[in-house]
Amino acid sequence: MLAMISEAWCKSGKCAWRVFLPLLAVLAAGGTSPTQASTFTEEEVVCPVGGEKFTRMALMSISTWGALPDGMPLGSGRFPVELPQCPSNGLVMYRDFTPEEVARLAPFIASEGYKALRSAGETPRYLAYRTAQFLGDKDLHWWLLEASWEAKNDDPAGERARRYNTEFVEAARLVKPDAGNLEAIAARFRLANGLRELGSFDETEAVRASIVISPKAGGKGTEARENRTAWAGTIADLAGPIARKETSRIPIDMLGVREAAGFCLRKEIAAKFEEPPPPPLTAFEQEYCAGPKLSETIKEQRKWLREED
């Protein structure tokens, strides 16, 4: 199972992160059952601009069990989920377009500016962001956040990842704080985390400490109450990485127990599946992995890993 994931996603010698994140998720789940696995179907798509037809593997179902501090889910497949993109003109079909929008998009995607973005290798979600910006869509910061996931999956320390993250931070600053709106609360937290990844620790802590969750945020009922509690815990947990001035995408103490145990085993994962070796664990990560909180789960996952064909 793990070898199949690795072989499918490792297309170059620089694939450690693209492979590690899904492997981490699979280890966290203790192996995927048929009900947990992602399912796909072949789909024929017609490009709204130009009418080009192409086929793609469309996602039918996917399971998730957690997320990184930047919001990218961990689950039974790779995130972010692939968006359909017209092969010839490069239009990213991130939503349905009206006939009026299609007419406006034709010259936009044929422009030298859009072609330059494609030639520069900008990610599909960044192209979606630029398209949404052109069309006047709202909440553009979320497209920038998801574009940063794509860039960080390829190279978390690369120029593109930092640039996208910086653009997201600037866009998220414009979101008005609202203690009664969970989406606004999420935007403030992602802003704080983005600032942390960029190394702006004083501002990070100022933003984190300013986040207030109203007792009415998200509405009434058990689910809303659980969401408020979860967000309060996540916001509090970010204080640790800020205090130790950690910029990594995956602070180990912000992962669940099973995900953190998988993180501790990443060197063994890489060796078993002949992947590029990951960076060594930091002193804090070594101490965290050696603690009693993870010991039993690490034993279970190491046993499962050794038994996996």
Image: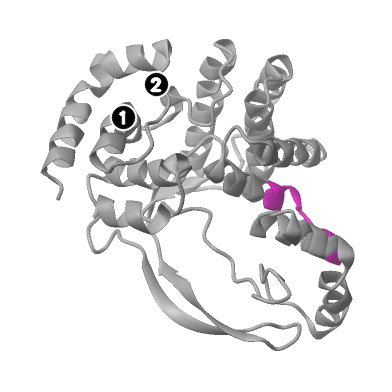
Q: Quadrant of the N terminus?
A: bottom left
Image location (x, y in percent) of residue 13 = 45, 44
Q: Nearer the viewer, residue 307 or 59?
A: 307
Q: Which residues are magenta?
A: 133-144
Q: Is residue 186 visible?
A: yes
Mark 1 closeness class: few <14, some 14–19, many ≥20 residues within 10 Å: some
**Among the 4 quarters of the image, the one containing residue 212:** top right
- Between the residue at mark 2 and the residue at mark 1, the CA separation in whole angstroms equals 8 Å
The residue to which callout 2 is attached is: 280
Q: Considering the numbered disc 1 on the image, is that residue within a helix, a strand or a loop?
A: helix
Q: Position of residue 57 (x, y in %)?
A: 46, 74
Q: Earlier in the sequence, mark 2 or mark 1?
A: 1
Disc 2 packing (10 Å; few <14; some 14–19; many ≥20)? few
Q: Which dot marks residue 16?
A: none
- How far from the left and from the top, in percent, is residue 258? 29, 34
Q: Is residue 238 left or right of residue 101?
A: left
| Magenta span contains residue 136 | yes
Provide the residue designation for mark 1: 267
Is 213 magenta? The answer is no
- Which element is circle 2 on? loop
Residue at 59% x, 16% y: name it.
Answer: 242
Q: Tell me how the rendering is colored.
A: one colour
Please give the name of the residue rendered at 41% of the width and 42% of the height, measured from the top-left corner: 21
Figure check: 304 above or below 242:
below
Give the amino acid at mark 2. Pro
